Amino acid sequence: MNIAYWCILIAGVMPLLTVIVAKAGRSDYDNAAPRAWMDKLQGMRRRADYAHRNHFEAFPFFAAAVLIAEQVDANPEYLDALAVGFIAARLLYTALYLADKPTLRSLAWIAGYGCVLALFGIAAYAS
């Protein structure tokens, strides 16, 4: 499995990691109404939940870009570099979200989004 495919797996696991941060150490978790319970979180736990949701939102666009670029035989070096760049941007995004640094977090989000757009760009160039 190539690096870009591993990055899809990592991106798919990221929501799980952030929701663990949101829920960790809380004994009052309500599995019958998890979203209502999550809506009551505050501080870092609340931001972890928001990052969790954003990871789910970002995943399909990224996965599609990697798969399309791979399908059209885009340059594998660029493909892997952009996929790793996306993961790095998302990890930074998460750290900045948890640290409550909204401006820097937005810049990291833009960097990740740019990687996805560039993945589509290399796919377009290759096809």
Image: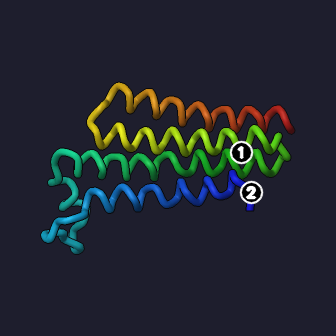
> Mark 2 packing: few (<14 Cα in 10 Å), some, or many (20+)?
few
Q: Is residue 18 above or below residue 24?
A: above
The answer to whether the residues at label 2 and label 1 have Cβ atoms under 8 Å apart is yes
Given residues 127 and 29, the one toward you in this image is: 29
Pointer 1 local density, CA inside 10 Å: few below 14, some 14–19, many at least 20: many
Could you tell me which residue is drawn at 61 percent across and 35 percent down?
115
Secondary structure type for disc 1: helix
Residue 46 percent coordinates (x, y)? 23, 49
In this view, 34 is above or below 48: below
Amino acid type, mark 1: Asp
Quadrant (top left/top right/bottom left/bottom right) for the N terminus: bottom right
Judged left or right of residue 28, residue 2 is: right
**Residue 84 percent across, percent down from the top left:** 62, 44
Element under disc 2: loop
Position of residue 70 in the picture relative to residue 13 (left or right): right
Residue type at mark 2: give it: Asn
The numbered mark at residue 80 is 1
- Residue occupying the far bottom of the picture: 32
Residue that appears at 55% across and 45% down: 87
As measured in the structure, the alpha-carbon distance from the residue carrying label 2 to the one carrying label 1 is 8 Å
Task: Kindly indicate the quadrant of the structure image that contains residue 120.
Answer: top right
* Label of residue 40 in the image: none
Q: Which residue is mark 2?
A: 2
Of marks 2 and 1, which one's residue comes earlier in the chain? 2
Q: Position of residue 50 (x, y in %)?
A: 32, 47
Q: Residue at x 31, y 30 (%)?
A: 102
Q: Position of residue 18 (x, y in %)?
A: 36, 55
